[in-house]
Amino acid sequence: MTQTKFKMGHLDHVHIRVPDRALAAQWYAENLGFEVVDKYAFWANEVDGGPLQISADGGRTMLALFEASPDHPMIPQTMGIAFSVDAQTFVNFARSLPNGINGPGGQPLRLNDIVDFDLCWVYNFTDPWGNHFELNCYDYEHIEESLIKEDDINPVRYWPRP
């Protein structure tokens, strides 16, 4: 009998350090559509130092908000956490800018901050505590037509076109 090689499952959650979990959960709800995942609320309410789990997709993928403390200092997640959305959601997000969300340099995120990665479009941004995020849309042609051309945007490119 041959043994099946182990394969990792889907991404469950990412640990995020914030100064105040409740304040952070409110910011994520108002700006990015996250909600507290009630099933795991006991970790935040009953476990000292436990995370507050929030999700924008019904709990399939979560952010685990951990409160900073003297033993666990505030260290922002600077490598970036990427989320993917459909074309209409991406266009709606883009056209809502500026909306209180900052880019990685601390300036308000603007419509023209969109990045062209040839296969997807991206907005890079941070939360108020310096944690970096990326919003991706892989419906390249739809975004090119309904946002880039329609709004006459000159996107950011990190490398020359192939």
Image (cartoon, grey):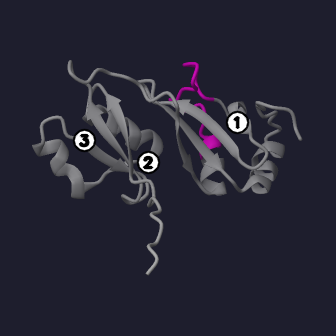
- The quarter holding residue 95 reads top right
Quadrant position of the N terminus in the picture:
bottom left
Label 2: which residue? 33
For numbered disc 2, what is the local secondary structure?
A: loop
For numbered disc 1, what is the local secondary structure?
A: loop
Give the distance between the C-alpha atoms of the residues marked 3 and 1, in whole angstroms. Answer: 32 Å
Identity, as a three-letter code, of the amino acid under mark 2: Gly
Vertical arrangement, residue 25 with respect to residue 76, above or below: below
- The quarter holding residue 82 reads top right
Magenta segment main secondary structure:
loop
Label 3: which residue? 51
Residue drawn at point x = 82 percent, y = 52 percent:
145
Identity, as a three-letter code, of the amino acid under mark 3: Pro
Q: Is 136 left or right of 43, judged from the image as shown?
A: right
Inspect the magenta stretch and tell me whether residue 108 lies in it.
Answer: yes
Residue drawn at point x = 70 percent, y = 44 percent:
121
Identity, as a three-letter code, of the amino acid under mark 1: Ile
Badge 3 or badge 1: first in the primary sequence: 3
